Image (cartoon, grey):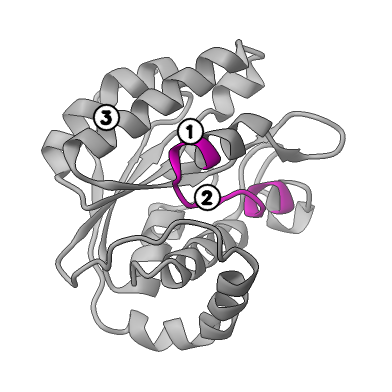
Amino acid sequence: MTGGKKPTAVACGGGGRILLWLFAGAALLLSACGADQPQLAHLDRDAVILAFGDSLTHGTGVDPEQSYPTVLAGLIGRKVVNAGIPGEITRNGLQRLPGVLDEVRPKLVILCHGGNDLLRRLDPKLAERNLREMVRLIREYGAEVVLVGVPAPSLLLGTAKFYQRIADDLAIPIESDILPELLGDNRYKSDAVHPNAAGYRRLANALAVLLKARGAI
C-alpha cells in the first residue's frame, strides 16, 4: 500500500508569474473572506514545497504532468515535490512522513490526507489524531502546513468536520471547499473519488490562490 515510491519533484520557471495575475483578484477576495486564517512565511524562489497525501496528491486518473502538484508548481514558480501514495491511510502516512521530510527538506507542506480512512469507514477519531500528529511532526521539523479538507462519503458532499477542527485548534490555513465542489460535479471527475485533469487544475488554482492570499507567494 505504501510501496517504495520516491517523491517526484517538479520545478517551474518564471512563466508561473504571468499566470498568478489571472487569479490575483480571486486571491484578494479570498483574503477578504478568510482574513481570520493564519498568514504564512513568504517562500523564497528556491524554497521547496512538499505535497503529502494519497491518490488525490499522486494524481490518480490523469497523467503525471496533470497532477495538482505539477500544475501548482507552474502556477507559483516554486519547486513542488509530489509525495502522494494511492490507497494510503493516515496511519501509514504518519509512519512515512518523517523519512519524506528528511529527504525533501521542505519549507511548506500541503497536507491532503484521510480520504481512504473515510472511504473505508475507519474511526474518524483515529484519522484526526494521525493528522494532528503529522502537523506536529511537520512543525517540529521547521516547516509550515496548509491543510486540504477531504469530503466524507455522503449524499451531500462536505468536508469531514475534523479538518476544520484541526485547522482551528492548530492555527493553520485550510482549503476546505474545493474538493467537495469538484467531487460533486461530474465535469471534474475521472471516477467516483478522483478529479480529472480539469479538476486537478482547479485544485491547484485554489491552492495557489490560498498561498497568495496568506502571503506565501
- Horizontally, is 189 left or right of 2 in the view? right
Label 2: which secondary element? strand
From this view, report whether residue 6 is shown above or below residue 75: above
What residue is rendered at 55% in x and 72% in y? 31
Q: Secondary structure at mark 3?
A: helix
Frontmost residue, 213 versus 115: 213
Upstream in sequence: badge 3 or badge 2: 3
Residue linked to disc 1: 113
Expressed as whole percent of the image width and height from the top left, the position of residue 106 reads 20, 49
Q: Quadrant of the C terminus?
A: bottom left
Q: CA distance from mark 3 to mark 2?
A: 18 Å
Query: Hey, what amino acid is under mark 3?
Result: Leu
Mark 1: which amino acid? His
> Which residue type does callout 2 highlight?
Ile
Q: Residue at x 12, y 38 (%)?
A: 103
Q: Which residue is label 2 attached to?
A: 174
In the drawing, does residue 114 fall left or right of residue 140?
A: right
Residue 43 image offset from top left, x and y in percent: 24, 66
Disc 3 designates what residue? 137
Question: Where residue 42 sits in the image (x, y, percent)?
Answer: 27, 68
Name the residue rendered at 34%, 67% in the picture.
Answer: 216
Q: Which residues are magenta?
A: 168-181
Q: Against 162, is 69 above or below?
A: below
Which element is circle 1 on? loop
Vertical arrangement, residue 80 with respect to residue 13, above or below = above
Image quarter of the N terminus: top left
**Quarter of the image where one finds residue 191:** top right
Residue 145 seen in render = yes
Residue appearing at x 62%, y 77% in the figure: 29
> Magenta segment: does it hold 43?
no
